[in-house]
Image (cartoon, helix red, strand yellow):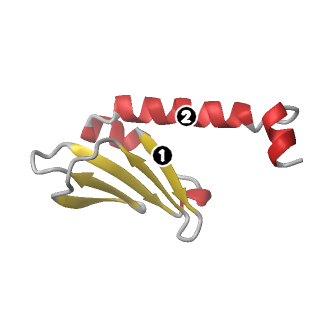
């Protein structure tokens, strides 16, 4: 999985595969699922991400548990890297 954040449009994208997108489904609340021709998830896009967002409601509906759990682990890692007193935060934020 690859996670990107576009500061210009305040959007987080969780890219699951490099398959071609056949269609995009608006799942509400500024969230969109890109699907391949077989209906498998290619990506999840979240608009207005800095305002916060919910993903748990999508877990059962679209079988996203593995994707969301991996995303949560990425967020935890990032929080640790930039936590108060971390060497990386000191270097980057200074």
Whether pointer 1 and pointer 2 mark residues with C-beta atoms closer than 8 Å, the reply is yes
Residue 74, which numbered label? 2
Q: Residue placed farthest to the bottom in the image?
A: 8
Choose the circle earlier in sequence order: 1 or 2.
1
Residue 3, which numbered label? 1
Q: CA distance from mark 1 to mark 2?
A: 9 Å
Q: Secondary structure at mark 2?
A: helix
Q: Position of residue 69 (x, y in %)?
A: 45, 29
Q: Is residue 63 left or right of residue 31?
A: left
* On screen, residue 16 above or below 65: below
At 34% from the left and 43% from the top, the residue drawn is 58
Q: Position of residue 59 (x, y in %)?
A: 34, 36
* On screen, residue 50 above or below 94: below
Q: Position of residue 80 (x, y in %)?
A: 71, 31
Q: Is residue 24 visible?
A: yes
At 59% from the left and 37% from the top, the residue drawn is 75
At 53% from the left and 64% from the top, the residue drawn is 48
Q: Position of residue 12 (x, y in %)?
A: 49, 55
Viewport quadrant of the N terminus: top left
Q: Secondary structure at mark 1?
A: strand
* On screen, residue 55 above or below 65: below
Q: Is residue 54 visible?
A: no
At 25% from the left and 44% from the top, the residue drawn is 41
Number of marks in picture = 2
């Amino acid at each position: 999985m690859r996670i990107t954040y576009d500061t210009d449009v305040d959007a987080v994208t969780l890219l699951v595969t490099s398959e071609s997108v056949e269609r995009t489904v608006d799942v509400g609340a500024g969230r969109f699922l890109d699907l391949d021709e077989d209906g498998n998830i290619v990506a999840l896009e979240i608009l207005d991400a800095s305002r916060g967002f919910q993903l748990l409601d999508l877990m059962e509906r679209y079988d996203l548990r593995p994707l969301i759990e991996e995303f949560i682990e990425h967020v935890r890692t990032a929080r640790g890297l930039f936590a108060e007193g971390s060497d990386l935060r000191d270097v980057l934020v200074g």
